[in-house]
Image: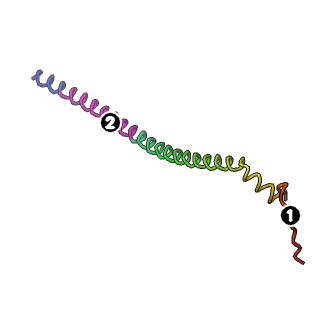
Amino acid sequence: MPDRKKVKKEKTKRSGTSRFVAVILLALSVCVVVNVAIQLNTYVLLRGQVEDLEKQIEEEKQKKEEYSNQMEYYSTDEYIEKIAREQLGLVMPDEIVFKVDNN
């Protein structure tokens, strides 16, 4: 009979160790799943931010292009002449100016 008691104790010892290992593995598995879920959520959020920023970059590039075109136009003789005529009332040397009185 002493052999049976030894076997029972060993089985109990093994099953206790097996349960402990199973609990540890389960806890580690839960930690891994939670960690992966958090990282996946962070990745999705950051990916959305990247897309938003890429859209903003494209919009700013378009604005820059428009501003460059305006700067080119503002430096042309045509624009300078237009502003001189409309805002400053200047005329070319060979032009005659007629003023009409609406009374």
Q: Amino acid at mark 2?
A: Ser
Tell me how many marks there are. Answer: 2
Which residue lies under the disc numbered 2?
A: 29
Relative to 6, is 38 on the left or the right? right
> Where 74 falls versus 98 (above or below)?
above
**Mark nearer the viewer, 1 or 2:** 1
Label 2, secondary structure: give it.
helix
Residue 95 figure quarter? bottom right
Relative to 8, is 52 on the left or the right? right
Which is more toward the observer, 32 or 47?
47
**Number of other residues with Cα within 10 Å of mark 2, as a class: few under 14, some 14 to 19, many 20 or more:** few
Residue 96 figure quarter? bottom right
Check the image and name the residue furthest to the bottom: 103
Which contiguous range is marked in magenta? 11-36
Mark identifier at residue 97 = 1
Residue 53 in the image: x percent, y percent?
53, 45
